[in-house]
């Protein structure tokens, strides 16, 4: 870790270059979300084994039930390796210990205690909250109004957490001045490589969350175990995950309605963006008793969302029983008129004519800790349940 004076010197040299780069590199994404399309993908097909680390002895591997995009390996004396597949590896070094000599340069070091975290990603916040680790997050990529996780909003309002700029425009001086020891980013940082490079040049490791690439809803929630390992809260993480798994197990008894659901939004280019049929949202629709209208979509890119033409969307979804517009990405749709203004062809859709058009709550993406509620909402929608009993879905009028 560099001393603070050196960090400020580096900051002065590189800040102008980074500001210039980010100013001319357009990135489309809503301020309060992080799931706009990226070129990232995760290969979950290959086998993963614990790497040999100099001076350390491998002891065990964390048991995972659903997550496919990471592994956690345990070594002697409390060392842990967080392996985010096809992305990066992070060695968690216990407080008072040092990284072993000869460690591969590709492995980033997370030196405990991690008590000044910059949370630029939004989805991990609920998981940190669930294990009681929000107090370790001192710097935020959203201001208080952007957080739907109450503990995060309260921390900012109370002065315990500070807005440190969005992921693509962080306040580098604040990161250095507060001795930030870890930046947690979403894959949106891949659109701003110079920003990531700058943060790392300042001696701050960058951890990229890829939980949204899990194919199963519980796989996404199981990332709480990774953060539990990172923060020495494995027991809390396991207990919370088990409670969520029990909720989902009960929901699996939903009767198959065979009703079709098109979950989508329309991007700034006017193209519909739908979920990959192997995505966790598609799985949640299936669990709830519905069928993803785009279940037969052919896409091997590994992306969670797939942009298609309006013609393709029309041909597949015109007869879908339900349309769900993802306002956690595009919050501009608040009424049926707002949706129809996106494209007049939508007026021909069966769901529009039948009055079965819904929108998600803006908070949906941040609540990685309550996926059972969204599945239950889907089921209530499919079976004519009351909107008053729903958490994340609202009917458009």
Image (cartoon, rainbow, N blue to C red):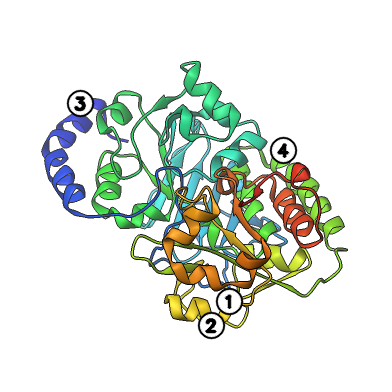
Q: Nearer the viewer, mark 4 or mark 1?
A: 1
The answer to which image quadrant residue 13 occupies is: top left
Percent of width and height locating residue 117: 45, 33
Q: Mark 1 or mark 3: which is in front?
A: 1
Residue to which mark 2 is pinned: 315
At a point 70% along the width and 44% down the height, the residue shown is 391
Whole-angstrom CA distance, mark 2 to mark 4, is 47 Å
Q: Find out whether the residues at labels 1 and 2 contact each other: C-beta distance under 8 Å.
A: yes
Classify mark 2: helix, strand or loop: helix
Residue 59 — which label? none
Check disc 4 and report its element: helix, strand or loop: helix
Left or right of residue 115, residue 268 in this image: left
Q: Which residue is mark 4?
A: 236
- Res. 42 in view: no
**Closer to the camera: disc 3 or disc 4?**
4
The answer to the question of whether label 1 and label 3 lie on touching residues, with beta carbons closer than 8 A, is no
The correct choice, above or below, for 229 with respect to 134 in the image is below
Assess whether mark 4 and mark 3 are in contact (beta carbons under 8 angstroms).
no
**Residue 352 vs residue 113: left or right?**
right
Query: Mark 1 to mark 2: distance in Å?
Result: 6 Å
Q: CA distance from mark 4 to mark 1?
A: 45 Å
Mark sitting earlier along the chain (3/2)? 3
Q: Earlier in the sequence, mark 1 or mark 3?
A: 3
In the image, is residue 217 above or below residue 235? Answer: below
* Residue underneath mark 3: 5
Mark 4 surroundings within 10 Å by alpha-carbon count, few (fewer than 14), some (14 through 19), many (20 or more): some
- The residue where tag 1 is placed is 318
Residue at 58 percent across and 54 percent down: it is 57
């Amino acid at each position: 870790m560099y001393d603070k004076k050196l960090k400020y010197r580096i900051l002065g040299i590189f800040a102008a270059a980074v500001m210039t780069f980010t100013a001319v590199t357009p990135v489309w994404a809503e301020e309060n979300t992080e799931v706009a399309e990226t070129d990232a993908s995760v290969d979950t097909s290959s086998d993963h084994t614990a790497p040999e680390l100099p001076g350390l002895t491998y002891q065990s591997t964390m048991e995972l039930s659903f997550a496919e995009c990471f592994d956690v390996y345990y070594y002697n004396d409390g060392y842990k390796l967080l392996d985010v597949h096809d992305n990066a590896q992070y060695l968690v070094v216990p407080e008072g210990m040092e990284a072993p000599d000869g460690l591969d340069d590709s492995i980033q070091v997370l030196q405990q205690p991690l008590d000044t975290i910059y949370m630029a990603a939004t989805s991990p916040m609920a998981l940190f909250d669930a294990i009681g680790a929000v107090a370790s997050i001192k710097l935020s990529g959203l201001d208080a109004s952007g957080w739907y996780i109450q503990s995060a909003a309260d921390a900012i309002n109370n002065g315990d957490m500070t807005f440190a700029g969005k992921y693509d425009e962080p306040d580098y001086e604040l990161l250095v001045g507060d001795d930030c020891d870890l930046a947690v980013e979403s894959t949106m940082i891949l659109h701003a490589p110079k920003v990531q490079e700058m943060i790392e040049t300042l001696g701050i490791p960058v951890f990229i969350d890829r939980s949204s690439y899990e194919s199963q809803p519980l796989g996404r929630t199981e990332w709480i175990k990774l953060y539990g390992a990172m923060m020495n809260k494995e027991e809390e993480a396991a207990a919370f995950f088990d409670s969520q798994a029990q909720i989902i197990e009960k929901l699996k008894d939903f009767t198959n309605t065979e009703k079709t659901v098109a979950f989508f939004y329309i991007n700034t280019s006017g193209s519909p963006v739908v979920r990959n049929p192997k995505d966790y949202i598609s799985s949640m629709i299936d669990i709830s008793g519905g069928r993803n209208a785009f279940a037969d979509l052919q896409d091997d890119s590994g992306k969670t969302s797939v942009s298609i033409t309006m013609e393709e969307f029309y041909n597949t979804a015109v007869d879908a029983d339900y349309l769900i517009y993802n306002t956690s990405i595009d919050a501009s749709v608040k009424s049926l008129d707002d949706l129809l203004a996106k494209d007049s062809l939508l007026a021909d859709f069966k769901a529009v004519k039948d009055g079965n058009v819904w929108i998600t709550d803006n908070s949906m993406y941040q609540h990685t800790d309550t996926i059972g509620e969204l599945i239950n909402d889907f089921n209530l929608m499919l079976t004519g349940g009351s909107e008053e009993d729903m958490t994340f879905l609202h009917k458009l009028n």
